[in-house]
Amino acid sequence: MDIDQMEVVERAGEAGDRATMRLNMLVAITVALLATFMGICKVKDDNICQSMQQAQANKLDHWGFYQARNIREEVAKGTLLQLQLAAATAPADAQPRYEAAIAQYQALAAEQRKKKEEVKALAEQDQKDYDAANFKDDQFDLSDVLLAIAISLLAMTALTHQRWLYAVALVPTGLGVLMGLAGLLGWQIHPAALVQLLS
């Protein structure tokens, strides 16, 4: 029984072609799934960025209102002090008018102080809303970076046909999907040191 060397080489080539085709198919499916996942994350991330911008605008508005209320309170206090000083030396028949004006400005100062504190609470809540949205935004940013690295490694895998490179690409793929899911599902996964490094 003679062994045909050409037939052995052809069979080895076919087996190699099948392995390469399977690897390319795995790469293509992985890239397609990652692109879809990245698209979903991008939509959510864009909405989060819009809410961050709105929270920032609200915070600035509320701090502006806070300053306006503060100025109104200080003006009312100044006027109140002037009225109290003037009332001390005013004739007895003018005292009821001074007392009425003093009561009015005391009420005005108290009202402005109360409204100032309400606006301050709103501004502080806006900052908390911004920080919560920024936490999620960081998760999506990390997901984008990791999945971009994964897609680059998958492209190299398709070019070189190296299976080990596909396995290496699965590491940033898994981490990127984890960070994307954390952003989508509200998980409290946040590598602060890495975010700080990239900031």
Image (tube, rainbow, N blue to C red):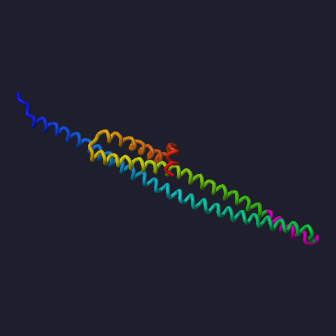
Q: Quick check: 25 left or right of 191?
A: left
Q: Please tell me which residue lies in front, 188 or 118.
A: 188
Q: Position of residue 81 (x, y in %)?
A: 84, 65
Residue pictured at 28% horizontal, 41% vertical = 162
Residue located 38% across and 48% down the image: 149
Position of residue 100 measured from the top left corner of the image (x, y, whole percent): 84, 67
- Per the image, is 92 magenta? yes
Residue visible at 74% across and 61% down in the picture: 111
Q: Residue at x 81, y 68 (%)?
A: 79
Quarter residue 9 falls in? top left
For residue 183, side relative to residue 95 (left or right): left
On screen, 24 above or below 80? above
| Residue furthest out toward the right | 92
What main secondary structure does the magenta stretch of the protein show? helix
Where residue 2 appears, as percent x and y from the top left, is: 5, 29
Left or right of 97 on screen, residue 118 = left
Considering every residue shown, the one lying at the far left of the view is: 1
Q: Quadrant of the N terminus?
A: top left
Residue 170 picture location, percent across and down? 36, 41
Q: Nearer the viewer, residue 36 or 168?
A: 168
As for residue 132 lying within the magenta part, the answer is no
Magenta part of the chain: 91-106
- Lateral position of residue 187 relative to residue 71, left or right: left
